[in-house]
């Protein structure tokens, strides 16, 4: 069920503004859950608008991988920090909350696509880094990329 924002006057509904926040962000807090145990982790991401997805480069094994294998449902938050307003006790921000499913990519083409999305999003000169991507099947086996397919988005500002 879609989230209903309590303070509707703070809701951002303009899709261009929401896309801008996602495109300009560099990291997200990813919230995961397994067996009623929550886990939050901060990750850099690559946004791919046509695929409507965030991509993450992760380790092949570890706590967050264990969580995703048990429960792929996830919630991600991206925050644009516009600073604390002195004397008013207010912090200006815009934020986007994304809900969707995480998929641990297994096909070489999908992993490469995700890495390129990451580099295109994070790097000023992604071509230079793309030349350093894995070359052999053995090198590619060591790479883990996740795809968070966006099912729902809400945004607000203060």
Image: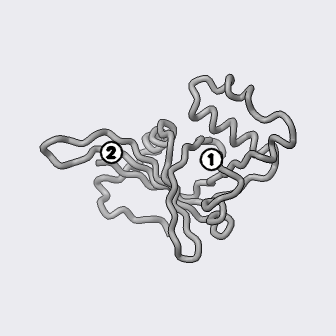
Neighbours of disc 1 within 10 Å: few (<14), some (14-19), many (20+): many
Q: Classify residue 25 as left or right of residue 108.
A: left
The residue that disc 2 covers is 93
On the question of residue 9 being in view, the answer is: yes
Residue 28 in percent (x, y) is at 50, 48
The residue that disc 1 covers is 56
Neighbours of disc 2 within 10 Å: few (<14), some (14-19), many (20+): some
Cα–Cα span, label 1 and label 2: 24 Å
Give the residue furthest to the front.
62
User: Which is nearer the eye, 117 or 58?
Assistant: 58
Which element is circle 1 on? strand
Above or below, 31 against 96 in this view is below
Tag 1 and tag 2, C-beta contact below 8 Å:
no
Give the residue furthest to the bottom.
35
Above or below, 79 against 124 in this view is below
Residue 89 in percent (x, y) is at 17, 49
Counting residues from the start of the chain, the first of labels 1 and 2 encountered is 1
Say which quarter of the image contains residue 128.
top right
Above or below, 70 against 126 in this view is below
Residue 137 in percent (x, y) is at 87, 42
């Amino acid at each position: 069920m879609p989230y209903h924002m309590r303070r509707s006057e703070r809701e951002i509904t303009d899709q261009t503004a929401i896309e801008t926040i996602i495109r300009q962000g560099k990291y997200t807090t990813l919230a995961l859950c397994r067996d009623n145990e929550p886990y939050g982790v901060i990750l850099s991401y690559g946004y791919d608008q046509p695929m409507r997805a965030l991509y993450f480069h992760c380790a092949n094994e570890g706590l967050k991988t264990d969580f995703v294998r048990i429960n792929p449902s996830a919630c991600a938050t991206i925050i644009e920090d516009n600073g604390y307003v002195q004397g008013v006790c207010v912090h200006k921000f815009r934020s986007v909350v994304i809900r969707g499913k995480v998929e641990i990519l297994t096909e070489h083409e999908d992993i490469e696509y995700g890495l390129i999305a990451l580099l295109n999003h994070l790097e000023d000169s992604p071509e230079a880094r793309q030349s350093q991507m894995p070359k052999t099947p053995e090198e590619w086996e060591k790479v883990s990329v996740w795809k968070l397919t966006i099912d729902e988005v809400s945004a607000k500002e203060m």
